[in-house]
Image (tube, rainbow, N blue to C red):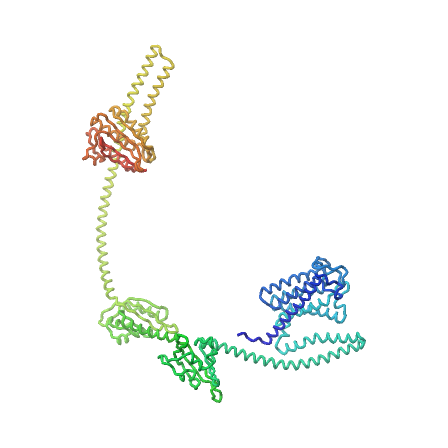
C-alpha cells in the first residue's frame, strides 16, 4: 500500500514543478529568440530598443532546459543530461564575461548569427552584455551545485538564485518605471527586458529546485512560521511594485506632485500591509488548526495502517467477527491457512464460510455448527487451544489447527465483536506423533537389545534405567542396579579409567567416549565390558544424562590373554630357533668362504690353462712360421746364386738386376706379413670392441696355411654376409685356430683321402653365424656330450691336454655372449658359432 503524502511533501512537489516550469519557460523564450536570429527576422532595430543577442538566446535555452532536468531530480542518466546542457552555456557566458573584463575578442560573438555594426547599447556587434554573461555564468554554476545534492552545495545554489532574481527584477523595474540606469549604459551595455524576465525565472527555478533544503526550507515548513512566510512573500514583492507604478503613473499624468505622490505611496503601504497582516493573522490561526487536524488524521491513518500491517503479518491467523453484522474480517495469514486468497468476497459471513470448509474432531467426527469456534466465541465463551481437523471441501488438503478466542464487550457489557486466532499445528502434531513412535521404538530397542544399555545421572552417578541384558550380565535385579551407583560396581583398579571422562562429560566438555573396564558381578567374579557413552543435553544445551551401551567382552579378553601367553611361548621358541639359525649361518658362512676359495683357485687354474693354451698355440704358430719361411728362404738363396752366375757368364744387366730385386722384395714382404699376423694374434686387448669376423677368420687361416698345405688339406671359406660382432678379436682367432687344428688332426688321424675343411660366414634369422665343418667322419655319439668338458680328450697324452674346446666355449659364451655347439653332418663334424645381432 502506497502511503499518503503529507502536506509538506505535497508542497514540495508543487514547488518542484514550479521550478521545472520556470526553467522550461525561460528555455522557450531563449529558443524563440534564437530561431528568430537564425531566420533573420530579428535585428537590433526590431521588436524593441534592445535585443537579446544570439549567444544570450543560446545560453538561455540551454540553461533553462538544464535547470528543468536538474529540478526534476530524476535518475543518474537524466542528471548527466543536465550537466551536458549546462556545460556549454556556462562556458559561452564565462568567455563573454572575460571578453568584457579583459577587452579581448575570442571570435564567439558572430559565430551563430551576424549583426551589423552600430547596434544599440553595445560596443561590439552581437555580443552578449555583461549582466547577461554574469547571470548565465552563475546560473550554470548553480545548476552544477544542485546536481551535487549536498547541503552546502544547495545553500550556495540558492544564494546564486537570489542574485539572479535581483538582477532580473532590477532590469524589469527599470523598464517598468522607465529608469534606464537599471537596464542600460548607453553605447556600453544593455539588457533586453525578455532577458531580464528570463533571468528572474532562472533565479526562481534555482530557489524552488530543492524547496525543503537551505533558505527555502523556511517557506515550505508546515509550521506557522512557514505559513506566514509563504503568505507574505508574494505581497511583499508584488504590492510595492504595483503601488510604486500607480503613484508614478498618476504623477506622470499630472494628477499630483512629487510630495503628494510620496505621501500617497506611504499611506498606501500602511493601509495595504495592515490589511494583509490582519488577514494573514486570521489565516495563520486557521492554518494551525487545520495543520493540527491534518496531523491528527495522518497519525490516525498511519496508526491504522501500522495496525493493519501488524495484523496482516502476524504468524497466526486472525478472524474478527462483528456482533451486529455477523461479518468476518480475515487477516492475510488466516486467508492463506484456508486457501482463501482469491475468494475474500465469498467468505465475509459465517454462512458462506461453512459452504467451503468443514471441521472435525481429531478422532475424525464431524463437528456440529454450534460447536464451531466462531459460534462459541459469539456466545461469549473463551477458547483455549481447541485443536480441530480442518478441510477445504473444494480441495484435498486436511490440516490440524489450534483455536483461541475471546469476546470483546463495551463498558456496559454488550458484545461488540469476537476475536479468534488460529495456529497451524499440523507439523507439530506430526512431530509429536513421530516422537512418540520414536520413543516406543527406542524403548523396544532398549529392552530387547542383546547388549547392555542404561542411562546414568550426573548428580549421584546412579542408573536412571537399565535393560534386562545389562542386569543379566552382572547378575543383579533391576531394583538393585538402580539403587547402586556405578562406581561401586566397578573394579577398583579400573575406576579412574571411567571416572575422569565421566566428570569431563558432566561438565559438558565431552560428547562421547569409550572405555574397557571390569565390572563386579554379584557372584564375586569380574566381568570385562566395553562401554560406549554418549551425552544427552537438556533444552538449554547443558548436560542432562548419559546413555551407556555395555558389551560383554569377557570371552574376548580371555582369548586375548590366551593369545598373549601363546605369543610369549612363540617368542621363546623364536629366540631358540634364532640361536640355532645363527649357528647354522656361521657354519654356512664358513662353508661359503671355503667354496669361494675353491672357485678362486679354479679361476686361477683356468687362467693358467688359458696361458698354457696360448703358449701351445704360440709354439705351433712358430712351427708354422718356420715352415712357411723355409721355402721363401730357399727361393731367396737360389735368386742370389742366379745373380752371381749371370754376372760370371757376362749376361748381368741393369734390367735383369731390377727384375731379380723385385722378386726378392716380394719374398721379404710375404715373410713380413706373416710376422704381422702372428703379432696381431698374440696382442692383448683390454676392452671388447667391434671387429670384422670375416677378416679375423681369413687372417687366422692364413697363419695355418703351411701345415694345411703340408697335409694337402683343402680349406674353403664361404663368405655369404659381412659379419661384425663385439669382443676380443685375438680370443676369437684363438677359437677359430682351435677348431681348424682339431679338424686337421682328425683328418690326419683317420687318413682321409681328400681332406677338406669348410668355413661358412652368414646370417640366419638375425644372428651372425660361423661354421667349421670337416669330412673326417664325425664324432662318436657316446662322447658327444663331453666334448666341451675340461681335460677331456680322445688323443693320446702326448698329443693333447683336453682344454682347447673347453676354453673355446668359455670365450664364445662367457666373454662374447654367443653360443658354441657341435653336431654331426653326413660326412663329418660341424662346429657352429652364433652371435645375436
Residue 213 in percent (x, y) is at 62, 71
Q: Answer left or right for 440 relative to 235.
A: left
Quadrant for the C terminus in the image: top left
Q: Answer left or right for 765 relative to 372.
A: left
Residue at the far left in the pictured view: 782
Q: Quadrant of residue 127?
A: bottom right
Q: Answer left or right for 378 relative to 704.
A: right
Residue 130 in percent (x, y) is at 72, 63
Q: Quadrant of residue 656?
A: top left
Viewer-proximal residue among 380 and 343? 343
Q: Tell me if residue 146 comes above or below residue 710 in the rendering.
A: below
Q: Is residue 387 visible?
A: no
Q: Tell me if residue 388 comes above or below residue 710 in the rendering.
A: below
Q: Is residue 581 visible?
A: yes
Residue 829 in percent (x, y) is at 23, 32
Residue at the far bottom in the pictured view: 412
Label tally: 0
Residue 368 in percent (x, y) is at 39, 83
Q: Tell me if residue 96 comes above or below residue 353 in the rendering.
A: above
Q: Quadrant of residue 481?
A: bottom left
Q: Tell me if residue 507 comes above or below residue 126 in the rendering.
A: below
Viewer-proximal residue among 57 and 184? 57
Amino acid at each position: 500500500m502506497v502511503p499518503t503524502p503529507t502536506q509538506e511533501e505535497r508542497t514540495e512537489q508543487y514547488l518542484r514543478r514550479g521550478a521545472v516550469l520556470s526553467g522550461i519557460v525561460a528555455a522557450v523564450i531563449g529558443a524563440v529568440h534564437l530561431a528568430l536570429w537564425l531566420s533573420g527576422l530579428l535585428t537590433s532595430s526590431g521588436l524593441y530598443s534592445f535585443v537579446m543577442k544570439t549567444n544570450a538566446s543560446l545560453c538561455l535555452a540551454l540553461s533553462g532546459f538544464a535547470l528543468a532536468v536538474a529540478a526534476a531530480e530524476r535518475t543518474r542518466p537524466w542528471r548527466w543530461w543536465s550537466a551536458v546542457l549546462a556545460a556549454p552555456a556556462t562556458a559561452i557566458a564565462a568567455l563573454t564575461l572575460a571578453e568584457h573584463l579583459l577587452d579581448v575578442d575570442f571570435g564567439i560573438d558572430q559565430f551563430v548569427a551576424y549583426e551589423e555594426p552600430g547596434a544599440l547599447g553595445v560596443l561590439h556587434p552581437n555580443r552578449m552584455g555583461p549582466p547577461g554573461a554574469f547571470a548565465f555564468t552563475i546560473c550554470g554554476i548553480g545548476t552544477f551545485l544542485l546536481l551535487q545534492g549536498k547541503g552546502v552545495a544547495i545553500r550556495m545554489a540558492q544564494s546564486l538564485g537570489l542574485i539572479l532574481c535581483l538582477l532580473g527584477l532590477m532590469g524589469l523595474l527599470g523598464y517598468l518605471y522607465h529608469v534606464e540606469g537599471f537596464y542600460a549604459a548607453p553605447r556600453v551595455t544593455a539588457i533586453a527586458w525578455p532577458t531580464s524576465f528570463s533571468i528572474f525565472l532562472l533565479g526562481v527555478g534555482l530557489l524552488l529546485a530543492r524547496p525543503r533544503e537551505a533558505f527555502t526550507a523556511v517557506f515550505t515548513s508546515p509550521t506557522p512560521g512557514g505559513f506566514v512566510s509563504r503568505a507574505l512573500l508574494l505581497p511583499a514583492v508584488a504590492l510595492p511594485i504595483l503601488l510604486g507604478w500607480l503613484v508614478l503613473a498618476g504623477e506622470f499624468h499630472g494628477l499630483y506632485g512629487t510630495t503628494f505622490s510620496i505621501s500617497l505611496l506611504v499611506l498606501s503601504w500602511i493601509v495595504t500591509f495592515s490589511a494583509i497582516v490582519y488577514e494573514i493573522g486570521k489565516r495563520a490561526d486557521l492554518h494551525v488548526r487545520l495543520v493540527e487536524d491534518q496531523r491528527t488524521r495522518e497519525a490516525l491513518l498511519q496508526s491504522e495502517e501500522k495496525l493493519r500491517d501488524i495484523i496482516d503479518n502476524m504468524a497466526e491467523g486472525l478472524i474478527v467477527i462483528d456482533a451486529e453484522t455477523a461479518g468476518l474480517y480475515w487477516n492475510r495469514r488466516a486467508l492463506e491457512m484456508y486457501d482463501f486468497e482469491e475468494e475474500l468476497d465469498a467468505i465475509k459471513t459465517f454462512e458462506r464460510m461453512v459452504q467451503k470448509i468443514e471441521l472435525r474432531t481429531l478422532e475424525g467426527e464431524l463437528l456440529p455448527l454450534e460447536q464451531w469456534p466462531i459460534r462459541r466465541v459469539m456466545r461469549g465463551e473463551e477458547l483455549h487451544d481447541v485443536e480441530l481437523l480442518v478441510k477445504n471441501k473444494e480441495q484435498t488438503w486436511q490440516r490440524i489447527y489450534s483455536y483461541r478466542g475471546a469476546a470483546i464487550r463495551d463498558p456496559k457489557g454488550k458484545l461488540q465483536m469476537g476475536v479468534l486466532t488460529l495456529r497451524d499445528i499440523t507439523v507439530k502434531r506430526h512431530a509429536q506423533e513421530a516422537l512418540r513412535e520414536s520413543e516406543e521404538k527406542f524403548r523396544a530397542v532398549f529392552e530387547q537389545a542383546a547388549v547392555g544399555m542404561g542411562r546414568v545421572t550426573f548428580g549421584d552417578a546412579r542408573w536412571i534405567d537399565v535393560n534386562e541384558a545389562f542386569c543379566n550380565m552382572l547378575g543383579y535385579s533391576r531394583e538393585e542396579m538402580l539403587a547402586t551407583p556405578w562406581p561401586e560396581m566397578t573394579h577398583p583398579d579400573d575406576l579412574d579409567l571411567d571416572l575422569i571422562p565421566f566428570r569431563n562429560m558432566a561438565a559438558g566438555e565431552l560428547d562421547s567416549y569409550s572405555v574397557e573396564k571390569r565390572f563386579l558381578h554379584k557372584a564375586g567374579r569380574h566381568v570385562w565390558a566395553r562401554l560406549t557413552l554418549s551425552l544427552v543435553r537438556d533444552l538449554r544445551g547443558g548436560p542432562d544424562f548419559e546413555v551407556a551401551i555395555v558389551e560383554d567382552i569377557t570371552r574376548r579378553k580371555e582369548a586375548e590373554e590366551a593369545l598373549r601367553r601363546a605369543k610369549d611361548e612363540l617368542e621363546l621358541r623364536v629366540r631358540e630357533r634364532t640361536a640355532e639359525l645363527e649357528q647354522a649361518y656361521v657354519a654356512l658362512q664358513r662353508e661359503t668362504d671355503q667354496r669361494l676359495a675353491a672357485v678362486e683357485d679354479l679361476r686361477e687354474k683356468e687362467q693358467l690353462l688359458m696361458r698354457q693354451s696360448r703358449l701351445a698355440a704360440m709354439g705351433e704358430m712358430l712351427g708354422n712360421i718356420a715352415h712357411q719361411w723355409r721355402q721363401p728362404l730357399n727361393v731367396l738363396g737360389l735368386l742370389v746364386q742366379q745373380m752371381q752366375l749371370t754376372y760370371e757368364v757376362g749376361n748381368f744387366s741393369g734390367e735383369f738386376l731390377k727384375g731379380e730385386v723385385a722378386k726378392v722384395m716380394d719374398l721379404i714382404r710375404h715373410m713380413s706379413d706373416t710376422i704381422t699376423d702372428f703379432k696381431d694374434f698374440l696382442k692383448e686387448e683390454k676392452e671388447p670392441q667391434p671387429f670384422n669376423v670375416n677378416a679375423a677368420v681369413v687372417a687366422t687361416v692364413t697363419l695355418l696355411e703351411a701345415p694345411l698345405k703340408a697335409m694337402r688339406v683343402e680349406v674353403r671359406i664361404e663368405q655369404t654376409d659381412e659379419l661384425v660382432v663385439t669382443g676380443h678379436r685375438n680370443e676369437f682367432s684363438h677359437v677359430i685356430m682351435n677348431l681348424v687344428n682339431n679338424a686337421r688332426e682328425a683328418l690326419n688321424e683317420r687318413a682321409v683321402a681328400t681332406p677338406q675343411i669348410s668355413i661358412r660366414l652368414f646370417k640366419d634369422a638375425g644372428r651372425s653365424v660361423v661354421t667349421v665343418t670337416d669330412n673326417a667322419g664325425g664324432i662318436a655319439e657316446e662322447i658327444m656330450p663331453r666334448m666341451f668338458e675340461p681335460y677331456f680328450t680322445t688323443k693320446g697324452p702326448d698329443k693333447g691336454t683336453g682344454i682347447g674346446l673347453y676354453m673355446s666355449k668359455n670365450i664364445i659364451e662367457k666373454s662374447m655372449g654367443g653360443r658354441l655347439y657341435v653336431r654331426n653332418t653326413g660326412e663329418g663334424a660341424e662346429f657352429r658359432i652364433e652371435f645375436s645381432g
